[in-house]
Amino acid sequence: MIKNLKKKYDLKVAKLKKGFLKNHNNKFFLKTHAHLVDTLLRELWCHVGLDHEVSLIGVGGYGREELYPFSDVDILVLHKDNMQKTAIEKVTKFITLCWDLGLKIGHSTRDLNQTIDEFEKDIRTATNLLETRLIIGSSILYENLREAIFKQINVSSFYEKKLNEQSIRHKKYRSSAYQLEPNVKESPGGLRDLHNVLWIAASQKKGSNFKDLLENKVINEDEYNKVTFHLTRVTKRRILLHFLANSVEDRLIFDLQNKLASHLGYNNNSRLRASELVMKSYYKSVNYIILFNEIIIKRLNPKTTSKVYLDHPLPFFISGDIIEIEKEYKGEFVDHLFDPFLLFQTHQNISGFGPNLLGLLDSTSRKINQNIRANDKLQKKFLQIFTAKNKVNRALRLLNKTNILGKFIPAFGKVVAQMQHDLFHIYTVDEHTLNVIENIRRYSKEKLKHEFPDCHDIFKSFTKPYLLYFAALFHDIGKGRGGDHSLIGEKIAIKFCRMMNFDKEESNLITWLVRSHLTMSQVAQKKDISNPQTIKEFAYFVKTKIRLQALYLLTGADIRGTSPAVWNQWKATLLKDLFNQTSNYLDDQLKDIHEIITIRKNNVLSRLGNTYSISSSEVELLWNSLGADYFYRFNENDILWHSRVLLKKFHSKETIVSTRHAPDGNGIEVLIFRKDSENIFIKASQYFANNNFDVMEAKIYTTHDGYALDVFNVLVDGNNISFKHLFNFIEKSLTETLNSEFKPITISDNQSRQAKFHKIESSIVFKKLNKEYEFTVSTAAREGLLFQLSNAINNLDLSITHAKINTLGHRVENSFILKSKKGPLSLKIINQLSNNIQRDLGISIAT
């Protein structure tokens, strides 16, 4: 009998699955699946001989007739006091048979008093018991349970506990719905946020589904239509995830995003991948669910607070810590579109808006057209939000939540919910943009001065900080349109500045920042900023200190806003050094580069004499052997360190390896000095790869006497480590590696899952620099990549004079300055190197 039951059940489930994959009828699938399990459980119940004195009750998702393909079947076996031994044995047999049939049963067996006790103790149990239905057994016992639950429930306490539970859940998922692999059930804006609305409503006897809420006037028809649409969309994705993973998988993981897109009919287009399109549709639903959740939960708040009306023509009032508007207000609200946000900024203790106001703002957003955007009074009020002293970022987040920001600036609306599958952004474009503005606002806070003291001081001296906010708002607005998003964004910003009647100076700064927002990062992380020529060229690019300061503030905020994994002390130090050197140069633009080198040398000599009692005559031979170019390649701190280490050893034939903490705490620096020989760089790269050290920069220099002077800047995990022992280990073991015969190793392809499943293209960009080439490889990060690239370079008899490694989350940019060991370096050799890298690394190259 059991085998036949299972066979019959499996056939019906297979047929149900086939039907769903064909027509995507979510509601039919979930309800039918639950009913198939109902039938199976009833037959098993009767088979073991359980009588009608015991109740079998479905709870949770199964109780509300929403059973996903691989979800647990949660049941409660409810019995009277003092259950007989025979009945206990029958229940045990029933549960065992359920497991034998392959059902994932989550069960509890209790009497009425035990159930109510558990209801009072645990909010999760209480929530499950609000969603119950009788499968088979005593209807009287079941009704007694229902009656006892609603007698026992404390509406206010339940409301507060569910809000707290939601807050904890959101924090678990880092409070942002916009993650690369969101959980469609648990993440903010997922199904749990809709369930929470229904649970709170059910506790107040206002309905257990959205149709009930409509009939009981908790929601209006527009809200009902929207929420059912987005519920259907997210539900469909959750069912498909289960089928595609063949397991309980509620995350939109990289492995399944392309498969999901294919099932839903999304294809790559000229601008976006299919995976980005399917995620954009999901995030649009997330946006509405987050707003709906806030509106309805606030509407269901059982507590009443007094009203304090505000001095305003419209019936705005403060209730607790929110601004609200009278429900009865039916006037033309669009003329006052930005007033709530300005009130929000002027009242420090206000944390948000009430449900009536949120709903009104959302519905009014649909009325925004070109005439509204061109309205002079509204433009001035919109600008006031940016020029306010307080809550700029929070006001902008409210504008985005209520869909006003994307309607008032349509170009911004196009990037709302747009995910970026580029291996380093983990947020949608709009969320990233607001993160960048938040980071700029952090510069203004005295209590956060310790984070970036120099940025705080620069920001405080900035007379028009709102220009920075607008530049941040537009810096990525051109994404998803094809082409250079910086140039596209500049054009959009120009139109906006004209519309807002900004003066020429303001417009020029905003649009220049949008066009140039990547430049400072590229120079700091790809160029040799110890070289005065680099500083001179960058100073020529920025032209003024105002531009330099603005770009510095925007660049740091932008990098920090992509992902917690992208920003590190190394990047902070590079940007700060580039800013300080450029600022000093702009203070005296007539300063000759040779004069800069003279000053650099004199400063080092002064420090050597004053601190270490080393005279200029003692270092003269060393410096002469290093050659004039050396002083263009290294800064004062570097030269001071090298001089002390090499002073009495620079003619030695022994390999010298020395380590130190890098200035400003950005990792450690490793100096290698030895008679020039083959494979020094490649040996060192392999050594660092084998020891899991991340190389951030390498400077490779050959002295006039034919010695190799290579310096590697390396990041290490400083937790629970003795740097004294680490330095000794590196100096000894790296020396042994450099002195031994080179033995190339094979490194497996260990790209991240995202890189594999999104098929992220790699790129090679090269630029001729006199007798050298600047050569940049951008690709998915993997262990040993620097070694692999240096091996390919070495095989073509090329030498590396400078290398910088810029890690961006799961993506890495390796920039090299290359020259030939055998005369001029030709374009033919560079193209051959590109082909060899594509072949050896197995990566797709767009050159």
Image (spheres, rainbow, N blue to C red):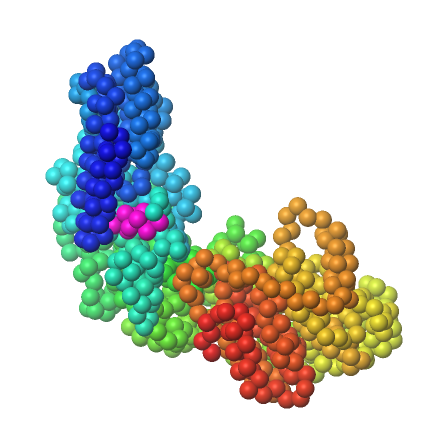
Frontmost residue, 397 versus 199: 199
Frontmost residue, 778 versus 561: 778
Q: Is residue 89 above or below residue 349?
A: above
- Taking the spot 65% from the left edge, 59% from the top edge, the residue there is 690
Percent of width and height locating residue 295: 25, 44
- Residue 60 in view, yes or no: no
Percent of width and height locating residue 5: 23, 33
Q: Residue furthest left?
A: 215
- Number of numbered discs: 0
Frontmost residue, 639 versus 12: 12
Q: Is residue 376 above or below residue 564?
A: below
- Taking the spot 62% from the left edge, 52% from the top edge, the residue there is 717
User: Would you identify the image quadrant in which residue 416 lies?
Assistant: bottom left
- Taking the spot 63% from the left edge, 61% from the top edge, the residue there is 689
Query: Quarter of the image containing the N terminus?
Result: top left
Asked if residue 616 is among those painted magenta in the image, a careful observer would answer no
- Residue 747 in view, yes or no: yes
Asked if residue 238 is among those painted magenta in the image, a careful observer would answer yes
Percent of width and height locating residue 109: 32, 21
User: Would you identify the image quadrant in which residue 454 lies?
Assistant: bottom right
Label the magenta part by its dominant secondary structure: helix
- Taking the spot 66% from the left edge, 67% from the top edge, the residue there is 744
Percent of width and height locating residue 713: 66, 64
Q: Which residues are magenta?
A: 236-245
Q: Is residue 378 above or below residue 603?
A: above
